[in-house]
Amino acid sequence: MKDCFVLQNVKLVNGSSVDIKVENKKIQNVVPAGTGNGGKAIDFKHKVIVSSGWIDMHVHAFPEFNPYGDEVDEIGYKTGVTTIVDAGSTGADRLPDLVNSCKKSKTNVFAFLNISRIGLKRIDELTDLSWLDEDALKGAIAEHKDFIIGLKARISKSVVGPNGVEPLKMARKFSKDTELPLMVHIGSGPPDINDVLDLLEKKDIITHYLNGKANNLFDEAGKPLPKLLDAIKRGVHLDVGHGNASFSFQTAEQAKEYGIHFDTISTDIYRKNRLHGPVYSMASVLSKFLYLGYPLKEVIDAVTVKAADWLNKPALGRISVGDLANLTLFSIEDEVTQLMDSEGEERTAEQNIVVKGVVINGEYIEC
């Protein structure tokens, strides 16, 4: 692709049509449809929607680790996602390897650092508190401060073993000492979800907030727990983190009924659930929220504006002249599609989001 091209007759999420000119990797102008010129023209004939590049706040992108690993670009730009955030695949021991593997990719990458130095080398990484090595953690952050955007703590029974909420208390101290927020994975207890909520502060992220497990954020009647409401008031951020076992249609419907909306939508994607479901791609996950009745703007804002704001990188969440061009092009197809949650429940949707292409750091790639 030449250094200059024009995306012609693309629709914004608000329905208006524009032409977007990209030159020397940056957005040079955004003008009414049919008025853009210069460079190679790519005409989408008003059939494709453009947004700023999608951001996935929870992926696993260290290919060496199983089951939680995958190649960066397979879960990045090839699926319409221009920026991914690895959610604690590696701790201090293997972080340099993750950084080096990401240098070979086109997709933009940031990461949460696992509070356990071994990361997901084992999936019970918080059962031995000696692995929560603050000196090693601080050293890794100092060396890769532009890559690390937070700390990851997986606080569920199979991960913490007999340690209960103690690893999260240690993570809270690490967070205070490093001034980095926490992303906290929630799931089966113990520890009790209320004890987890008590330890969360402004800008911390609860990921898997729509899981259908017994220890979730809603009571037996589907009402949000009082401590969840308190956490939201404190500024705790709600992230979907779909994954193999952490998204329930029923829980999502309860949350929507009581006005507990997502801040960000993420996939928790890795090789297994990309190839065999129930995740498949960001587009598939976003389609589930259209099915649930959320407006398109709210759905797309969750993977653009809101994600970029949390990252303190607002340029990634907007289409603005002068910014490096990261864009996602997609359509909403009227087609019957079967959607499955992490509980094995299937729903039939009448619309499906389909990615058509991306502009990744100024390069247009058809998907």
Image (spheres, rainbow, N blue to C red):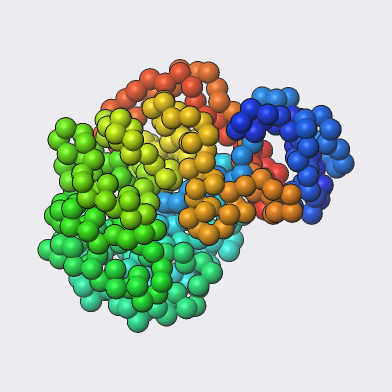
- Front one among 316 and 352: 316
Q: Quadrant of residue 152?
A: bottom left
Q: Is residue 332 above or below residue 308?
A: above
Quadrant, the C terminus: top right
In screen coordinates, is 65 left or right of 21? left
Residue 334: percent from the left, percent from the top?
A: 53, 18
Q: Report the number of discs.
A: 0
Which residue: 39% across, 58% down? 203
Which residue: 20% across, 44% down? 225
Asked whether the viewer can see residue 123, the reply is no
Asked whether the viewer can see residue 347, the reply is yes
Q: Is residue 76 above or below residue 175?
A: above
- Front one among 256 and 274: 256
Which residue: 36% across, 48% down? 238
In this view, which residue lies farthest toward the right? Answer: 38
In screen coordinates, is 233 left or right of 24? left
Residue 258: percent from the left, percent from the top?
A: 29, 34
In screen coordinates, is 245 left or right of 275? left
Q: Is residue 278 above or below residue 145?
A: above
Residue 310: percent from the left, percent from the top?
A: 48, 55
Q: Quadrant of residue 162?
A: bottom left
Which residue: 48% across, 36% down? 299
